[in-house]
Amino acid sequence: MAPVTQAITRFAPSPTGRLHLGHAASAWFAAERGRFLLRIEDIDPSRCRPEWTQGILEDLAWLGLSWPEPVRLQSAHLEDYRAALRCLEDMEVLYPCFCTRREIEEEVRRAGAAPHGAEGPVYPGTCRAMDPAERADRLAVCQGTSWRLDSAQATRLVGPLTWRDARKGLVPVRADLLGDVVVARKEIGTSYHLAVTVDDALQGVTLVTRGEDLFDSTHVHRLLQALLKLPEPAYHHHRLLLDETGKRFAKRDQSCTLQSLREAGVTPREIRERTRLPE
Ligand code: GLU
């Protein structure tokens, strides 16, 4: 009989606040499905704080979770994301974007029925169509810029793709869903989409578990994997934990942080009971 190989799973919170019950549910979901790794997604220094990273480690240890490998802090690996970015640049699937948020909003409003993706309006492609001479002039004088993935060009290069989700089965990649996402933000030089794709591969993750709110992002991640020739993990986008009123937990709601529950005398076992996710 072939040996049963254990999946490698991960929990990848961003330290933008204290963990809440929804995070506990997600962390357990991953920990119960394989060799469990922890990654701190702290690429954005304007939103992440070291004390929140510390809080995440404390909360997870209090819950009784442990991870066999050192925690991967994304902020300590920016060079890995730069290397991937260079690779994409060489493939000519990126273009610089000089638009401000407001310009994008105005353009979307002007276009009227611009499509909306899971992350808001899909970028209308303004800078993709820029004249090459103008692009070169602007690149020469700007102090850093963001880079977007030309999703149509990328799709032409790699051809049709699919990914497999434990709940939804085989999913055909639709690169148009999120459109030309930013793969490198101006101030950071990378983005959630790029860093998560690179790290899941570098950490050898074979089963990506995360909330279904991130389902559409996987279309982008699968495309990036194919471009960068990275292995394809399996996915399990789980349902989100809801509070008594049917709302999902959010970091801004401080009443249900694991820290405040701990201080109120709630035990890890009680938290475990309250955070079982429906299939
Ligand atoms: N860092 C992301 C978050 O906190 C999760 C990323 C992922 O699981 O892919 O929402």
Image (spheres, grey):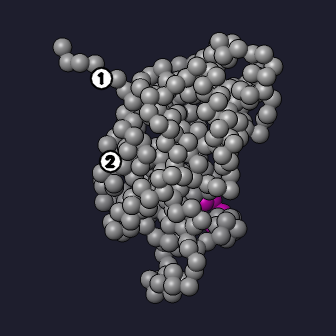
Q: Which residue is drawn at 44% across and 22% down?
A: 33
Q: Position of residue 9 (x, y in %)?
A: 44, 30
Residue 128 drawn above or below residue 277: below
Could you say which quadrant of the image residue 122 lies in? Answer: bottom right
Q: Which residue is drawn at 51% across and 81% down?
A: 139
- Write down the residue under mark 2: 230
Q: Which residue is drawn at 58% across and 19% down?
A: 64
Q: What element carries label 2?
A: loop
Q: Residue at x 47, y 36 (%)?
A: 70
Q: Residues within 10 Å of mark 1 (few under 14, many from 20)?
A: few
Could you say which quadrant of the image residue 143 lies in? Answer: bottom right
Which of disc 2 and disc 1 is earlier in sequence? 1
Quadrant assignment for the N terminus: top left
Q: What stretch is highlighted in magenta?
A: 110-114
Whether residue 112 appears in magenta in the rendering, the answer is yes
Q: Position of residue 60 (x, y in %)?
A: 61, 27
